């Protein structure tokens, strides 16, 4: 009988604790956005190969573990994206390419998301962005155009990356 009373009391207390825990909000989602911009032009090609020629880069430590989204952005006066493209890629500390984001010259797409590599919190990574020419010469790549690369997690690009000073030259 004492055992039954004990079990009933333990169940009641557990029920109170569970109900209290269910009423609490979930812990906040980890958010991070890393950004780098490149205004120089390189006629090198091969974004997915991770060619660093003519690229801007930043090395960062992942504060969140999980799937990061890579995004490219390319802006020019008048919105012209036909002569160049942004090549974005992410490498781990060993130099392995983990993900890529880029458009083809034919698409004229100025912004889009690319791969979603899984990063480990506390590890270092390098984000590269290159302004690449669609032709044989960088003379076709307008000087006022800027290529931007982002790696972000936890929320949308607009909310997570809206105030990143190094990426707003």
Image (cartoon, grey):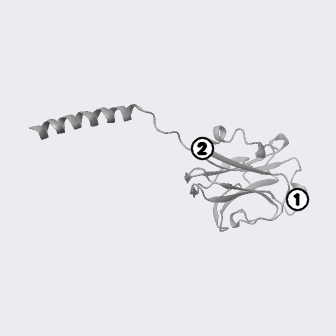
Left or right? Give the position of 25 relative to 45. Answer: left
Snapshot quadrant of residue 95: bottom right
Can residue 97 be seen in this snapshot?
A: yes
Within 10 Å of the Cα at label 2, are there few (<14), some (14-19), or many (20+) other Cα atoms? Answer: some
Where residue 86 sits: x, y (%)?
75, 54
Q: Which residue is mark 2?
A: 31
Left or right? Give the position of 78 relative to 106. Answer: right
Left or right? Give the position of 57 relative to 94. Answer: right
Quarter that holds the C terminus: top right
State the residue in front, 143 or 120: 120
Q: Is residue 155 above or below residue 16?
A: below
Secondary element at image label 2: loop
- Mark 1 or mark 2, whichever is nearer to me: 2
Q: Is residue 51 above or below residue 30?
A: below
Snapshot quadrant of residue 119: bottom right
Residue closest to the far right: 139
State the residue in front, 164 or 156: 164
Q: Which residue is mark 1?
A: 138
State the residue in front, 154 or 72: 154
Residue shown at the point (62%, 53%) measured from the top left: 62
Mark 1 and mark 2 lie on one chain; the one further toward the N terminus is: 2
């Amino acid at each position: 009988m004492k055992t039954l009373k004990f079990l009933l009391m333990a169940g009641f207390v557990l029920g109170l604790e569970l109900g209290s825990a269910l009423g609490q909000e979930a812990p906040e989602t980890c958010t991070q956005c890393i950004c780098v911009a490149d205004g120089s032009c390189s006629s090198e090609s091969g974004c997915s190969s991770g060619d660093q020629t003519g690229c801007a880069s930043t090395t960062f430590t992942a504060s969140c573990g999980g799937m990061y989204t890579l995004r490219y952005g390319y802006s020019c006066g008048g919105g012209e994206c036909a002569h160049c493209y942004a090549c974005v890629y992410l490498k781990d500390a060993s130099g392995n390419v983990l993900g890529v984001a880029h458009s083809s010259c034919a698409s004229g797409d100025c912004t889009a998301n690319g791969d979603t590599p899984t990063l480990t919190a506390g590890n270092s990574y390098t984000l590269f962005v290159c302004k690449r020419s669609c032709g044989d010469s960088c003379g076709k790549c307008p000087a006022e155009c800027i290529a931007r690369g982002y790696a972000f997690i936890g929320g949308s690009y607009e909310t997570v990356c809206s105030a990143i000073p190094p990426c707003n030259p």
